[in-house]
Amino acid sequence: MSDESPLIRSLRAAVAAAPGDVPLRLHLAELLLAAGRNDDAVTEAAVALQHAPGDADARALMGRAMGMPPAAPPHAPPHAPHTPQAPAAPPPVESGGGTGFDWAAAEQEVGDIVRPRFVEGTEAPLTADSHGDDRGDADTWDVETPGGIRLADVGGMQEVKDRLEAAFLAPMRNPELRKLYGKSLRGGLLLYGPPGCGKTFIARAVAGELGAGFLSISLSDILDMYIGASEKNVHDIFETARRQAPCVVFLDELDALGAKRSRTHHSGLRNVVNQLLTELDGIAGAANDGVFVLAATNVPWDVDIALRRPGRLDRTLLVLPPDAAARDAILRYHLRERPIESVDLGKLVKATEDFSGADLAHVCESAAESALLDSARTGRIRMIGMADLLGAARQIRPSTEPWFATARNVATFANDGGMYDDLLAYLKKKRRL
Protein backbone atom coordinates (compact mmCIF):
# COMPACT_ATOMS: atom_id res chain seq x y z
CA MET A 1 0.00 0.00 0.00
CA SER A 2 1.18 3.53 -0.81
CA ASP A 3 0.74 4.81 2.78
CA GLU A 4 2.97 2.13 4.30
CA SER A 5 6.31 3.08 5.77
CA PRO A 6 9.45 1.82 4.03
CA LEU A 7 10.17 -0.43 7.02
CA ILE A 8 6.76 -2.12 6.83
CA ARG A 9 7.14 -2.60 3.08
CA SER A 10 10.58 -4.14 3.61
CA LEU A 11 9.26 -6.46 6.30
CA ARG A 12 6.37 -7.51 4.06
CA ALA A 13 8.87 -8.49 1.36
CA ALA A 14 10.96 -10.40 3.89
CA VAL A 15 7.89 -12.26 5.22
CA ALA A 16 6.83 -13.15 1.67
CA ALA A 17 10.28 -14.62 1.08
CA ALA A 18 10.23 -16.57 4.38
CA PRO A 19 6.55 -17.25 5.21
CA GLY A 20 7.42 -19.71 7.98
CA ASP A 21 9.55 -17.22 9.98
CA VAL A 22 7.17 -16.60 12.90
CA PRO A 23 9.30 -14.02 14.82
CA LEU A 24 9.71 -11.97 11.64
CA ARG A 25 5.97 -12.07 10.96
CA LEU A 26 5.20 -11.04 14.56
CA HIS A 27 7.61 -8.12 14.23
CA LEU A 28 5.65 -6.99 11.17
CA ALA A 29 2.39 -7.39 13.12
CA GLU A 30 3.79 -5.23 15.97
CA LEU A 31 4.63 -2.45 13.51
CA LEU A 32 1.18 -2.68 11.93
CA LEU A 33 -0.43 -2.49 15.36
CA ALA A 34 1.68 0.54 16.26
CA ALA A 35 0.56 2.16 13.01
CA GLY A 36 -3.08 1.67 13.99
CA ARG A 37 -3.73 -1.07 11.41
CA ASN A 38 -5.27 -3.53 13.83
CA ASP A 39 -7.02 -5.68 11.22
CA ASP A 40 -3.77 -6.28 9.34
CA ALA A 41 -2.03 -7.08 12.61
CA VAL A 42 -4.72 -9.67 13.46
CA THR A 43 -4.24 -11.29 10.06
CA GLU A 44 -0.47 -11.56 10.47
CA ALA A 45 -0.85 -12.96 14.01
CA ALA A 46 -3.37 -15.50 12.74
CA VAL A 47 -0.98 -16.70 10.02
CA ALA A 48 1.78 -16.92 12.65
CA LEU A 49 -0.48 -19.16 14.75
CA GLN A 50 -1.01 -21.31 11.68
CA HIS A 51 2.72 -21.96 11.54
CA ALA A 52 3.19 -22.17 15.33
CA PRO A 53 -0.07 -23.15 17.09
CA GLY A 54 -0.09 -22.09 20.73
CA ASP A 55 2.70 -19.50 20.37
CA ALA A 56 2.35 -17.25 23.43
CA ASP A 57 3.61 -14.08 21.73
CA ALA A 58 1.28 -14.54 18.76
CA ARG A 59 -1.71 -15.06 21.04
CA ALA A 60 -0.83 -12.04 23.14
CA LEU A 61 -0.36 -9.84 20.09
CA MET A 62 -3.66 -10.98 18.61
CA GLY A 63 -5.43 -10.16 21.88
CA ARG A 64 -4.01 -6.62 21.85
CA ALA A 65 -4.87 -6.14 18.19
CA MET A 66 -8.44 -7.24 18.81
CA GLY A 67 -8.78 -4.90 21.78
CA MET A 68 -9.21 -7.64 24.35
CA PRO A 69 -8.39 -6.36 27.84
CA PRO A 70 -5.80 -8.46 29.66
CA ALA A 71 -7.19 -10.39 32.58
CA ALA A 72 -6.09 -9.25 36.00
CA PRO A 73 -3.52 -11.60 37.56
CA PRO A 74 -5.04 -13.91 40.15
CA HIS A 75 -4.54 -12.72 43.76
CA ALA A 76 -4.22 -14.97 46.77
CA PRO A 77 -7.01 -14.58 49.36
CA PRO A 78 -6.13 -12.41 52.36
CA HIS A 79 -6.35 -15.33 54.76
CA ALA A 80 -5.39 -18.90 53.96
CA PRO A 81 -7.24 -21.04 56.51
CA HIS A 82 -5.63 -24.32 57.32
CA THR A 83 -8.86 -26.18 57.77
CA PRO A 84 -9.66 -28.56 54.93
CA GLN A 85 -12.18 -27.25 52.43
CA ALA A 86 -13.94 -28.66 49.42
CA PRO A 87 -11.76 -28.13 46.37
CA ALA A 88 -12.68 -25.00 44.50
CA ALA A 89 -13.48 -25.12 40.84
CA PRO A 90 -10.21 -24.78 38.92
CA PRO A 91 -9.63 -21.46 37.22
CA PRO A 92 -9.84 -21.47 33.44
CA VAL A 93 -6.62 -22.66 31.89
CA GLU A 94 -4.97 -19.99 29.77
CA SER A 95 -2.53 -21.50 27.35
CA GLY A 96 0.09 -19.22 25.93
CA GLY A 97 1.50 -17.60 29.03
CA GLY A 98 -1.61 -16.18 30.72
CA THR A 99 -2.32 -13.28 28.40
CA GLY A 100 -5.95 -13.80 29.33
CA PHE A 101 -8.72 -12.85 26.97
CA ASP A 102 -11.90 -14.41 25.68
CA TRP A 103 -10.59 -17.10 23.33
CA ALA A 104 -14.11 -18.20 22.41
CA ALA A 105 -14.81 -14.76 21.02
CA ALA A 106 -11.40 -14.67 19.32
CA GLU A 107 -12.09 -17.99 17.65
CA GLN A 108 -15.32 -16.58 16.20
CA GLU A 109 -13.42 -13.54 14.86
CA VAL A 110 -10.66 -15.44 13.09
CA GLY A 111 -12.33 -18.78 12.45
CA ASP A 112 -11.92 -18.38 8.71
CA ILE A 113 -8.18 -17.64 9.06
CA VAL A 114 -6.88 -19.98 11.75
CA ARG A 115 -7.78 -23.60 11.09
CA PRO A 116 -8.73 -25.96 13.94
CA ARG A 117 -5.85 -27.95 15.38
CA PHE A 118 -7.94 -31.11 15.83
CA VAL A 119 -10.93 -32.55 14.00
CA GLU A 120 -13.32 -35.32 14.89
CA GLY A 121 -12.37 -38.77 13.61
CA THR A 122 -15.91 -39.54 12.44
CA GLU A 123 -15.57 -37.62 9.19
CA ALA A 124 -14.95 -39.33 5.87
CA PRO A 125 -11.24 -39.94 5.19
CA LEU A 126 -9.41 -37.15 3.45
CA THR A 127 -8.57 -37.53 -0.22
CA ALA A 128 -6.29 -35.67 -2.57
CA ASP A 129 -9.08 -33.11 -3.03
CA SER A 130 -9.40 -32.43 0.69
CA HIS A 131 -7.84 -29.37 2.24
CA GLY A 132 -7.01 -30.70 5.68
CA ASP A 133 -3.59 -31.41 7.10
CA ASP A 134 -3.56 -34.81 5.37
CA ARG A 135 -3.57 -33.23 1.92
CA GLY A 136 0.20 -33.41 1.84
CA ASP A 137 0.29 -37.12 2.53
CA ALA A 138 1.65 -38.87 -0.54
CA ASP A 139 -0.76 -41.77 0.04
CA THR A 140 -3.73 -39.55 -0.86
CA TRP A 141 -2.82 -39.57 -4.57
CA ASP A 142 -4.51 -42.37 -6.47
CA VAL A 143 -2.37 -44.42 -8.83
CA GLU A 144 -4.23 -46.42 -11.45
CA THR A 145 -3.23 -50.07 -11.54
CA PRO A 146 -1.17 -51.40 -14.48
CA GLY A 147 -2.81 -53.09 -17.41
CA GLY A 148 -5.78 -52.14 -19.52
CA ILE A 149 -4.80 -50.10 -22.56
CA ARG A 150 -1.81 -51.16 -24.67
CA LEU A 151 -0.28 -49.63 -27.79
CA ALA A 152 -2.08 -52.30 -29.83
CA ASP A 153 -5.31 -50.58 -28.79
CA VAL A 154 -4.19 -47.36 -30.48
CA GLY A 155 -5.57 -47.50 -34.00
CA GLY A 156 -3.06 -46.75 -36.77
CA MET A 157 -0.37 -44.17 -35.96
CA GLN A 158 2.34 -46.75 -36.62
CA GLU A 159 5.06 -44.12 -36.96
CA VAL A 160 4.28 -42.80 -33.48
CA LYS A 161 4.36 -46.34 -32.07
CA ASP A 162 7.69 -47.09 -33.74
CA ARG A 163 9.28 -43.95 -32.33
CA LEU A 164 7.91 -44.68 -28.88
CA GLU A 165 9.35 -48.19 -29.06
CA ALA A 166 12.79 -47.06 -30.22
CA ALA A 167 13.23 -43.97 -28.09
CA PHE A 168 11.44 -44.91 -24.90
CA LEU A 169 9.97 -48.37 -24.49
CA ALA A 170 12.75 -50.68 -25.71
CA PRO A 171 15.37 -49.42 -23.21
CA MET A 172 12.84 -49.70 -20.38
CA ARG A 173 11.84 -53.27 -21.25
CA ASN A 174 15.37 -54.70 -21.40
CA PRO A 175 17.08 -54.55 -17.98
CA GLU A 176 20.19 -56.43 -19.16
CA LEU A 177 20.79 -54.01 -22.01
CA ARG A 178 20.18 -51.09 -19.65
CA LYS A 179 22.79 -52.47 -17.30
CA LEU A 180 25.26 -53.05 -20.13
CA TYR A 181 24.93 -49.54 -21.49
CA GLY A 182 24.54 -47.81 -18.11
CA LYS A 183 20.99 -46.62 -18.83
CA SER A 184 19.09 -45.65 -15.69
CA LEU A 185 15.50 -46.81 -15.22
CA ARG A 186 14.02 -43.37 -15.64
CA GLY A 187 12.92 -41.21 -18.50
CA GLY A 188 10.99 -38.18 -19.65
CA LEU A 189 9.01 -37.71 -22.84
CA LEU A 190 7.06 -34.69 -24.07
CA LEU A 191 4.12 -35.39 -26.38
CA TYR A 192 3.01 -32.37 -28.41
CA GLY A 193 0.65 -31.69 -31.26
CA PRO A 194 -2.79 -30.32 -32.08
CA PRO A 195 -5.59 -30.81 -29.53
CA GLY A 196 -7.83 -33.86 -29.63
CA CYS A 197 -5.31 -36.20 -31.28
CA GLY A 198 -4.96 -38.78 -28.50
CA LYS A 199 -1.92 -37.68 -26.46
CA THR A 200 -3.53 -38.75 -23.18
CA PHE A 201 -4.63 -42.09 -24.66
CA ILE A 202 -1.09 -42.76 -25.88
CA ALA A 203 0.31 -41.95 -22.42
CA ARG A 204 -2.03 -44.52 -20.85
CA ALA A 205 -0.99 -47.05 -23.49
CA VAL A 206 2.68 -46.47 -22.63
CA ALA A 207 1.92 -47.18 -18.96
CA GLY A 208 0.19 -50.39 -20.03
CA GLU A 209 3.19 -51.43 -22.14
CA LEU A 210 5.54 -50.88 -19.21
CA GLY A 211 3.25 -52.63 -16.73
CA ALA A 212 3.46 -49.45 -14.65
CA GLY A 213 0.97 -47.56 -12.54
CA PHE A 214 -0.52 -44.40 -14.02
CA LEU A 215 -0.79 -41.10 -12.15
CA SER A 216 -2.47 -38.34 -14.17
CA ILE A 217 -1.90 -34.79 -12.94
CA SER A 218 -3.34 -31.47 -14.11
CA LEU A 219 -3.04 -27.88 -12.89
CA SER A 220 -6.13 -28.12 -10.68
CA ASP A 221 -4.56 -31.03 -8.77
CA ILE A 222 -1.53 -28.94 -7.82
CA LEU A 223 -2.52 -25.33 -7.29
CA ASP A 224 -3.51 -24.40 -3.72
CA MET A 225 -4.45 -21.09 -2.16
CA TYR A 226 -2.04 -21.55 0.77
CA ILE A 227 1.60 -20.48 0.53
CA GLY A 228 3.88 -23.42 -0.12
CA ALA A 229 1.04 -25.93 -0.50
CA SER A 230 1.30 -26.12 -4.31
CA GLU A 231 5.00 -26.96 -4.14
CA LYS A 232 4.26 -29.58 -1.47
CA ASN A 233 1.63 -31.15 -3.73
CA VAL A 234 4.22 -31.51 -6.50
CA HIS A 235 6.62 -33.16 -4.05
CA ASP A 236 3.93 -35.54 -2.75
CA ILE A 237 3.00 -36.60 -6.29
CA PHE A 238 6.57 -37.64 -7.06
CA GLU A 239 6.95 -39.30 -3.65
CA THR A 240 3.86 -41.38 -4.44
CA ALA A 241 5.34 -42.37 -7.80
CA ARG A 242 8.67 -43.32 -6.20
CA ARG A 243 6.93 -45.47 -3.59
CA GLN A 244 4.81 -47.25 -6.18
CA ALA A 245 7.43 -47.59 -8.93
CA PRO A 246 7.28 -48.52 -11.69
CA CYS A 247 4.91 -45.65 -12.25
CA VAL A 248 4.12 -43.25 -15.10
CA VAL A 249 3.51 -39.66 -13.99
CA PHE A 250 1.48 -37.95 -16.70
CA LEU A 251 1.56 -34.14 -16.63
CA ASP A 252 -1.38 -32.98 -18.71
CA GLU A 253 -1.35 -29.47 -20.23
CA LEU A 254 2.30 -28.95 -19.35
CA ASP A 255 2.16 -25.37 -20.66
CA ALA A 256 -0.08 -24.54 -17.67
CA LEU A 257 2.02 -26.43 -15.10
CA GLY A 258 5.42 -25.50 -16.51
CA ALA A 259 4.92 -22.18 -18.24
CA LYS A 260 7.96 -20.07 -19.05
CA ARG A 261 8.99 -18.36 -15.84
CA SER A 262 10.08 -15.26 -17.73
CA ARG A 263 6.44 -14.72 -18.72
CA THR A 264 4.91 -15.69 -15.39
CA HIS A 265 4.14 -12.76 -13.12
CA HIS A 266 2.66 -14.80 -10.27
CA SER A 267 5.35 -16.02 -7.88
CA GLY A 268 3.28 -19.07 -6.94
CA LEU A 269 3.39 -20.44 -10.49
CA ARG A 270 7.13 -19.76 -10.74
CA ASN A 271 7.65 -21.72 -7.53
CA VAL A 272 5.64 -24.63 -8.96
CA VAL A 273 7.94 -24.75 -11.98
CA ASN A 274 11.01 -24.62 -9.70
CA GLN A 275 9.66 -27.49 -7.60
CA LEU A 276 8.84 -29.50 -10.71
CA LEU A 277 12.42 -29.09 -11.94
CA THR A 278 13.73 -30.24 -8.58
CA GLU A 279 11.53 -33.34 -8.55
CA LEU A 280 12.50 -34.28 -12.09
CA ASP A 281 16.12 -34.31 -10.95
CA GLY A 282 15.32 -36.43 -7.87
CA ILE A 283 15.76 -34.35 -4.73
CA ALA A 284 17.74 -35.21 -1.63
CA GLY A 285 19.34 -38.20 -3.26
CA ALA A 286 15.98 -39.83 -3.93
CA ALA A 287 16.48 -41.56 -7.26
CA ASN A 288 13.71 -41.44 -9.79
CA ASP A 289 14.46 -44.94 -11.03
CA GLY A 290 11.20 -46.53 -12.07
CA VAL A 291 9.46 -43.18 -12.43
CA PHE A 292 8.62 -42.39 -16.05
CA VAL A 293 7.48 -38.84 -16.68
CA LEU A 294 5.26 -38.22 -19.67
CA ALA A 295 3.89 -34.78 -20.44
CA ALA A 296 1.49 -33.45 -23.05
CA THR A 297 0.97 -29.99 -24.44
CA ASN A 298 -0.59 -28.27 -27.42
CA VAL A 299 1.84 -25.35 -27.20
CA PRO A 300 5.39 -26.64 -26.51
CA TRP A 301 6.79 -23.21 -27.33
CA ASP A 302 5.20 -21.91 -24.09
CA VAL A 303 6.89 -24.54 -21.88
CA ASP A 304 9.84 -23.41 -19.76
CA ILE A 305 13.03 -24.40 -21.58
CA ALA A 306 14.58 -25.77 -18.37
CA LEU A 307 11.98 -28.55 -18.37
CA ARG A 308 13.36 -29.79 -21.70
CA ARG A 309 16.96 -29.86 -20.50
CA PRO A 310 18.76 -33.25 -20.88
CA GLY A 311 17.82 -35.54 -18.04
CA ARG A 312 14.30 -34.12 -17.72
CA LEU A 313 11.77 -34.05 -20.56
CA ASP A 314 14.58 -34.31 -23.06
CA ARG A 315 12.74 -36.35 -25.71
CA THR A 316 9.82 -35.02 -27.74
CA LEU A 317 7.29 -36.80 -29.90
CA LEU A 318 4.94 -35.12 -32.35
CA VAL A 319 1.42 -36.59 -32.21
CA LEU A 320 -0.28 -35.67 -35.47
CA PRO A 321 -3.93 -35.99 -36.54
CA PRO A 322 -4.88 -39.65 -36.96
CA ASP A 323 -3.83 -41.27 -40.23
CA ALA A 324 -6.21 -43.26 -42.43
CA ALA A 325 -5.92 -46.48 -40.40
CA ALA A 326 -6.47 -44.57 -37.17
CA ARG A 327 -9.46 -42.68 -38.58
CA ASP A 328 -10.98 -45.99 -39.66
CA ALA A 329 -10.58 -47.41 -36.13
CA ILE A 330 -11.94 -44.25 -34.48
CA LEU A 331 -14.99 -44.07 -36.75
CA ARG A 332 -15.74 -47.76 -36.17
CA TYR A 333 -15.54 -47.16 -32.41
CA HIS A 334 -17.97 -44.23 -32.41
CA LEU A 335 -20.44 -45.95 -34.75
CA ARG A 336 -20.34 -49.36 -33.07
CA GLU A 337 -23.56 -48.92 -31.04
CA ARG A 338 -25.46 -46.67 -33.46
CA PRO A 339 -28.01 -47.85 -36.06
CA ILE A 340 -26.16 -47.53 -39.39
CA GLU A 341 -26.62 -48.97 -42.86
CA SER A 342 -24.60 -48.98 -46.09
CA VAL A 343 -21.71 -46.97 -44.60
CA ASP A 344 -18.62 -46.88 -46.82
CA LEU A 345 -15.90 -46.32 -44.25
CA GLY A 346 -13.19 -45.99 -46.91
CA LYS A 347 -14.99 -43.05 -48.50
CA LEU A 348 -15.67 -41.50 -45.10
CA VAL A 349 -12.02 -41.85 -44.08
CA LYS A 350 -10.92 -39.95 -47.21
CA ALA A 351 -13.47 -37.20 -46.50
CA THR A 352 -12.13 -36.63 -42.98
CA GLU A 353 -8.43 -36.07 -43.65
CA ASP A 354 -6.76 -33.78 -41.06
CA PHE A 355 -9.64 -34.36 -38.64
CA SER A 356 -8.63 -34.97 -35.03
CA GLY A 357 -10.06 -37.82 -32.98
CA ALA A 358 -12.41 -35.33 -31.30
CA ASP A 359 -13.53 -34.07 -34.73
CA LEU A 360 -14.35 -37.62 -35.83
CA ALA A 361 -16.42 -38.20 -32.71
CA HIS A 362 -18.27 -34.96 -33.49
CA VAL A 363 -18.96 -36.14 -37.06
CA CYS A 364 -20.60 -39.32 -35.74
CA GLU A 365 -22.57 -37.36 -33.16
CA SER A 366 -23.82 -34.84 -35.73
CA ALA A 367 -24.83 -37.58 -38.16
CA ALA A 368 -26.78 -39.35 -35.41
CA GLU A 369 -28.47 -36.07 -34.50
CA SER A 370 -29.51 -35.51 -38.12
CA ALA A 371 -31.07 -38.96 -38.37
CA LEU A 372 -32.80 -38.54 -35.00
CA LEU A 373 -34.38 -35.20 -35.96
CA ASP A 374 -35.52 -36.60 -39.31
CA SER A 375 -37.10 -39.59 -37.56
CA ALA A 376 -38.86 -37.26 -35.10
CA ARG A 377 -40.28 -35.11 -37.92
CA THR A 378 -41.52 -37.98 -40.08
CA GLY A 379 -42.56 -40.31 -37.29
CA ARG A 380 -40.63 -43.14 -38.93
CA ILE A 381 -37.36 -44.49 -37.54
CA ARG A 382 -34.56 -44.57 -40.08
CA MET A 383 -30.92 -45.66 -39.96
CA ILE A 384 -27.85 -43.44 -40.11
CA GLY A 385 -26.51 -43.48 -43.66
CA MET A 386 -23.62 -42.11 -45.67
CA ALA A 387 -25.55 -38.94 -46.50
CA ASP A 388 -25.73 -38.08 -42.80
CA LEU A 389 -22.05 -38.79 -42.20
CA LEU A 390 -20.73 -37.00 -45.29
CA GLY A 391 -23.03 -34.05 -44.62
CA ALA A 392 -21.67 -33.78 -41.09
CA ALA A 393 -18.08 -34.04 -42.35
CA ARG A 394 -18.68 -31.19 -44.83
CA GLN A 395 -20.10 -28.93 -42.10
CA ILE A 396 -17.26 -29.49 -39.64
CA ARG A 397 -13.92 -27.81 -40.21
CA PRO A 398 -10.90 -29.67 -38.81
CA SER A 399 -10.04 -28.19 -35.43
CA THR A 400 -6.36 -28.80 -36.19
CA GLU A 401 -6.16 -26.00 -38.79
CA PRO A 402 -5.71 -23.07 -36.35
CA TRP A 403 -3.03 -25.04 -34.51
CA PHE A 404 -1.04 -25.69 -37.68
CA ALA A 405 -1.32 -22.00 -38.62
CA THR A 406 0.44 -21.06 -35.38
CA ALA A 407 2.83 -24.01 -35.34
CA ARG A 408 4.01 -23.24 -38.87
CA ASN A 409 5.40 -19.86 -37.77
CA VAL A 410 7.09 -21.35 -34.71
CA ALA A 411 8.63 -24.24 -36.64
CA THR A 412 9.87 -21.92 -39.39
CA PHE A 413 11.34 -19.11 -37.32
CA ALA A 414 11.99 -20.56 -33.84
CA ASN A 415 13.25 -24.09 -34.43
CA ASP A 416 16.06 -23.83 -31.88
CA GLY A 417 18.04 -27.05 -31.57
CA GLY A 418 15.92 -28.79 -34.19
CA MET A 419 13.08 -29.51 -31.77
CA TYR A 420 10.45 -29.00 -34.48
CA ASP A 421 12.20 -30.87 -37.32
CA ASP A 422 9.42 -33.50 -37.35
CA LEU A 423 6.82 -30.80 -37.60
CA LEU A 424 8.67 -29.09 -40.45
CA ALA A 425 8.93 -32.39 -42.33
CA TYR A 426 5.19 -32.97 -41.93
CA LEU A 427 4.31 -29.44 -43.08
CA LYS A 428 6.50 -29.86 -46.17
CA LYS A 429 4.91 -33.23 -46.92
CA LYS A 430 1.45 -31.68 -46.63
CA ARG A 431 2.63 -28.63 -48.64
CA ARG A 432 1.66 -26.23 -45.87
CA LEU A 433 4.91 -24.24 -45.91
Image (tube, helix red, strand yellow):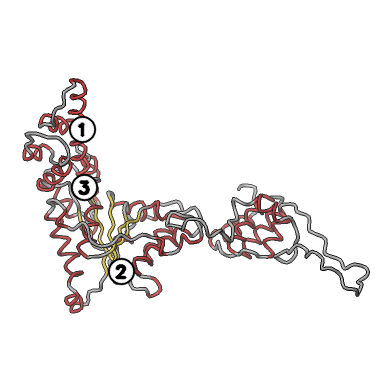
> What amino acid type is highlighted by mark number 1?
Ser
Helix, strand or loop status at disc 2:
loop
Image position of 315 with respect to 112: above or below: below
Q: Horizontal placement of 61 versus 146: left or right?
A: right
> What amino acid type is highlighted by mark number 3?
Cys
Residue at left 91%, top 75%?
A: 82
Residue named by callout 1: 366
Camera-near label (2 vs 3) is 2
Say which mark, if any, is on residue 410.
none
Instruction: Tell me residue 371's x, y (percent).
Output: 17, 28
- Neighbour tally class for label 2: few under 14, some 14-19, many 20 plus, Cα within 10 Å: some
First-in-chain label (1 vs 3): 3
Q: Is residue 79 visible?
A: yes
Residue at left 34%, top 66%?
A: 241
> What amino acid type is highlighted by mark number 2?
Ala
Circles 1 and 3, Cβ within 8 Å, touching? The answer is no
Q: Is residue 433 visible?
A: no
Marks 1 and 3, how far apart at CA: 19 Å
Marks 2 and 3, how far apart at CA: 28 Å
Residue named by callout 3: 197
Instruction: Tell me residue 214's x, y (percent).
Output: 29, 60
Residue at left 18%, top 51%?
A: 423
- Neighbour tally class for label 3: few under 14, some 14-19, many 20 plus, Cα within 10 Å: many
Front position in the image: 281 or 218: 218
Instruction: Tell me residue 152's x, y (percent).
Output: 14, 56
- In the displayed image of the protein, which residue is found farthest to the top? 378
Circles 2 and 1, Cβ within 8 Å, touching? The answer is no
Front position in the image: 75 or 1: 75
